[in-house]
């Protein structure tokens, strides 16, 4: 059964680790991006964008890369933009393949083609990153970088506040997986498990959801300006038409509630404000509860490594350092140590829920709790994104570069393999259709054994 997840905000999953500009600055990544963008208000690509990216790839990428390979990638990108092959020069020494000489070729291409220099530059820089063949290493242009950063660290956006689950087999259907608390969708009465039948006059049944263009026919109609409305047709014991007014939404990373006397916390992402959002929500639960907690990491694409470590320390590890993961950089192995905290849940029975789109920071948390014997993991095998990226502002643009590969504390490989649950429980199209959550049911049953 093939399923995939769609967020109606632009979300780029990944374990983020702020790059060199942050070190020692004492400023947040949001401030750093604003400062860098102020240096380049036009958003045009320049030699310094190319130079800084060239240097960081050679120095920081988690696999050894030669200058020649970075140079070659840049020429591939330049060739694609020009529509013709640019020949790679032959130098005797690797260090001769420099950013300066690559820039000379960009200038030469501009002069002979009369194409826009900024476009040629962006194509070249993107080529240097794309040539790595790493789907998580990206270079994002200045006009896209705000959405990119918001996806990694969380933040505000205009929308209706829902997350969809899309099925393409055995039949094509879309369900609302999550209605975010205090969102326009919640105010309009939408609920988890409502099936989306149509957006305005576009019917799901008439689309091919495997095709990107057809998919955007849905998302483009749901997006829009704050204060405007969108008409959704949903199925919940019959068809209903719901008008939802788009608004600016402050994205919360976590939400906690009680299931009987069990604490149930959904972590939507490991953004910059995770701990603030989590503690706020957790401490708002006034009623007495048993020492049992469910941490729901399903469909959590990750976020910041620091937020994952802070969450582990707050819940399960005391003041001593703990090993959060095994780190591999090129051929060197080290332990990723986290500084312990108050271990508020050290005496709790803990279940972690995961699925195929639990990724990156979610996998670090699930793997650490599983390996240290702090939790039982229930659900399906996770995504398998066992790498960490450094998020670097580059004159308003964004370089997100893989700098580490991580394994679990005991040495299970995560990348392309994922975390295997202790108890496997599937959740498929029939469960969504009947508003069932067998994985959550399994967690409650585990506590009641």
Image: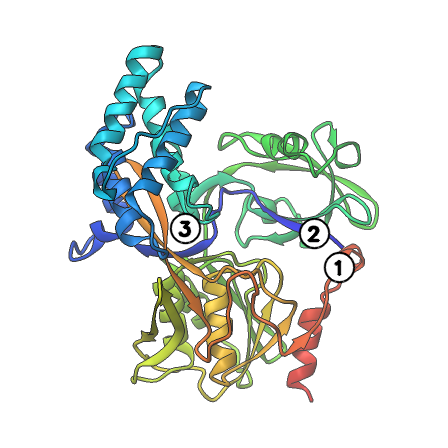
160 left or right of 438 in image = left
Q: Position of residue 76 (x, y in %)?
A: 41, 31
The residue shown at (38%, 39%) is 139
Examine the image and state in which quarter residue 218 appears. top right
Residue ID for mark 2: 3
Q: Earlier in the sequence, mark 1 or mark 3?
A: 3
139 left or right of 298 in image = left
Q: Which of the numbered marks, if any, corresponds to residue 152?
A: 3
Observer-nearest of 72 and 431 = 72
Residue contact between numbered discs 2 and 1, judged by CB atoms under 8 Å = yes
Residue ID for mark 1: 428
Q: Earlier in the sequence, mark 2 or mark 1?
A: 2
The residue shown at (45%, 25%) is 80
The span from disc 2 to disc 1 (Cα, nearest Å) is 8 Å
Say if residue 103 shows up in the picture.
Answer: yes
The residue shown at (55%, 33%) is 223
């Amino acid at each position: 059964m093939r399923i995939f997840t769609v967020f109606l905000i632009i979300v780029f999953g990944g374990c983020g680790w702020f790059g060199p500009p942050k070190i020692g600055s004492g400023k947040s990544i949001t401030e750093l991006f604003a400062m860098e963008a102020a240096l380049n208000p036009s958003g045009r690509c320049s030699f310094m964008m190319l130079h800084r990216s060239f240097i960081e790839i050679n120095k920081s990428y988690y696999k050894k890369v030669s200058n020649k390979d970075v140079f070659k990638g840049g020429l591939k990108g330049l060739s694609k933009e020009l529509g013709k092959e640019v020949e790679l020069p032959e130098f005797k020494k690797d260090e001769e393949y420099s950013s300066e000489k690559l820039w000379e070729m960009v200038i030469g291409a501009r002069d002979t083609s009369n194409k826009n220099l900024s476009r040629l530059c962006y194509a070249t820089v993107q080529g240097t990153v794309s040539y790595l063949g790493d789907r998580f290493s990206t270079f994002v242009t200045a006009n896209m970088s705000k959405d990119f950063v918001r996806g990694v660290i969380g933040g505000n956006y205009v929308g209706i506040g829902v997350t969809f689950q899309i099925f393409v087999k055995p039949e094509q259907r879309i369900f609302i997986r999550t209605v975010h608390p205090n969102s326009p969708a919640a105010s309009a009465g939408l609920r988890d498990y409502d099936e989306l039948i149509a957006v305005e006059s576009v019917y799901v049944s008439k689309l091919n959801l495997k095709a990107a263009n057809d998919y955007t026919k849905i998302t483009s109609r749901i997006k829009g300006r704050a204060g405007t409305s969108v008409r959704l047709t949903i199925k919940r014991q019959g068809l209903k038409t719901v008008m939802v007014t788009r608004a600016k939404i402050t994205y919360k990373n976590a939400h906690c509630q009680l299931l009987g006397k069990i604490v149930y916390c959904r972590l939507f992402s490991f953004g910059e404000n995770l701990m603030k959002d989590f503690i706020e929500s957790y401490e708002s639960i006034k009623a007495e509860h048993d020492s049992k907690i469910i941490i729901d990491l399903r469909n959590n694409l990750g976020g910041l490594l620091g937020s994952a470590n802070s969450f582990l320390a707050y819940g399960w590890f005391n003041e001593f350092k703990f090993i959060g993961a095994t780190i591999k950089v090129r051929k060197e192995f080290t332990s990723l140590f986290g500084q312990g905290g108050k271990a508020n849940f050290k005496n709790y029975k803990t279940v972690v829920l995961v699925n195929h789109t639990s990724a990156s920071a979610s996998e670090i948390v699930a793997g650490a709790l599983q390996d240290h014997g702090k939790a039982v993991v229930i659900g399906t095998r996770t995504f398998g994104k066992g790498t960490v990226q450094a998020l670097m502002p580059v004159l308003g643009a964004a370089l997100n570069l893989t700098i580490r590969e991580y394994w679990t504390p005991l040495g299970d490989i995560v990348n392309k393999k994922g975390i295997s649950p202790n108890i496997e429980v599937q959740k498929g199209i029939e469960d969504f259709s009947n508003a069932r959550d067998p994985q959550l049911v399994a967690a409650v049953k585990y506590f009641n054994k």
